[in-house]
Amino acid sequence: MEQTKKRISSICYAAGNSGGHIIPCLTLATRLKQERPQISVIFFSSTSSIDQTILAENSALIDQHIPLSLSHKRSLLRMPIICMHLLWTTLKSFYLLRRYKPSRIISTGGIVAAPVSIAGWLLRIPIDLYELNAVPGKAIKALAPLATTIYVCFSNTKKHFAKKNCHLTQYPVRFDQKIIPSVLPYQFSPDRLTIFVQGGSQGSQYINSKIKELIETCPEIRTTIQLIHQTGSDTSVDWNAFYKKYEIPSHVFSYDHDMAPYYQHADLIICRSGAGALFEALFFQAPCITIPLETKHNTHQLDNALAMVAEHPKLFTMIRQGKDVVDKLYEAILNLKRGAD
């Protein structure tokens, strides 16, 4: 991270409503704090449960945590409420920024970035924005004119900020080193492929359903794989009982701050295409099948997946949502098993 070398008393960070925004922002704060322990960290987040969980685990890092109540349900009928929330949180941010006098504001996007950046711009505080995705999101696009510096993690993203002070930087991966443990955990077998199903901080019901379908419909694969499965909040299946039924070694969890051991043991990663998931898979150099989330109004994960496959074709394979997802997963796993043998 590029920061001025002058003495700084406090830095403000703003991110929220998903691990994809909060975790890299915390990583940036952690690195700066390691370099300059005297710095005070002010962190603006949303009031969502995932924000509170993640920030509680990093309470030693944060000197002032300020949750902002912002509406995330966008519709024409709710526009007056959204505008009122934005106005109130901007005023609150203005008051607190003026009180704490941070030397810089750093944000990785999300709606929380809006009131903090607007207030910071009015107070003439330098603003660094990190666009983590291949194609800029709405928040970063809207706030770009207020930014002092913009940092991007995909090389092609720079073209979206041609008239701004824009720099290519490494994604702020939360891990510092790659140490491969010698012992497999969870009674896993060295003769099976270890698949890490990385559902993200909130899980992926779609990927969960395809893994379930794969195991139910492809009996020959049951004896060749073992799973580390981040299911998120999905309680539609008793996953421990499911894997036990098919005699598949497994470790199931919903959320864990320490994800490094799961990546380190993975022969294959299956994940969505959030920037964090892709760059963490790249960090550990494990083969990765990524299935981007695609909705009518949001295709940023598809853009991320296309960009990562283009830059690292030997490591990344993209499978788009559709009827043949299970068949493609089955084929990819068999090919990887043959290569391992």
Image (cartoon, rainbow, N blue to C red):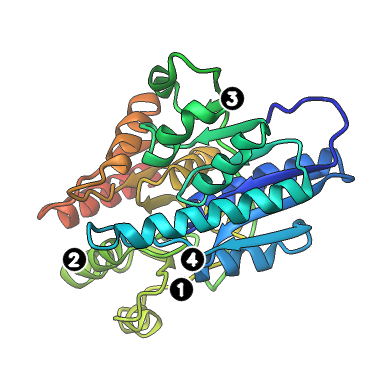
Residue drawn at the location 42% of the way across and 59% of the way down: 84
In front here: 277 or 248?
A: 277
Name the residue that disc number 3 marks. 149
How far, Cα to Cα, is label 4 from label 3?
49 Å
Amino acid type of the residue that numbered disc 2 sits on in the rendered structure? Cys
Q: Is residue 176 visible?
A: no
Q: Which residue is mark 1?
A: 252
> Which dot marks residue 218?
2
Disc 2 on helix, strand or loop?
Answer: loop
For residue 189, the mark is: 4
**Does the image show residue 173?**
yes
User: Mark 1 to mark 2: distance in Å?
Assistant: 21 Å
Badge 4, how many Cα within 10 Å: few under 14, some, many 20+? Answer: some
Q: Is residue 281 above or below residue 325?
A: above
Labels 4, 2: front one:
2
The amino acid at mark 1 is Val
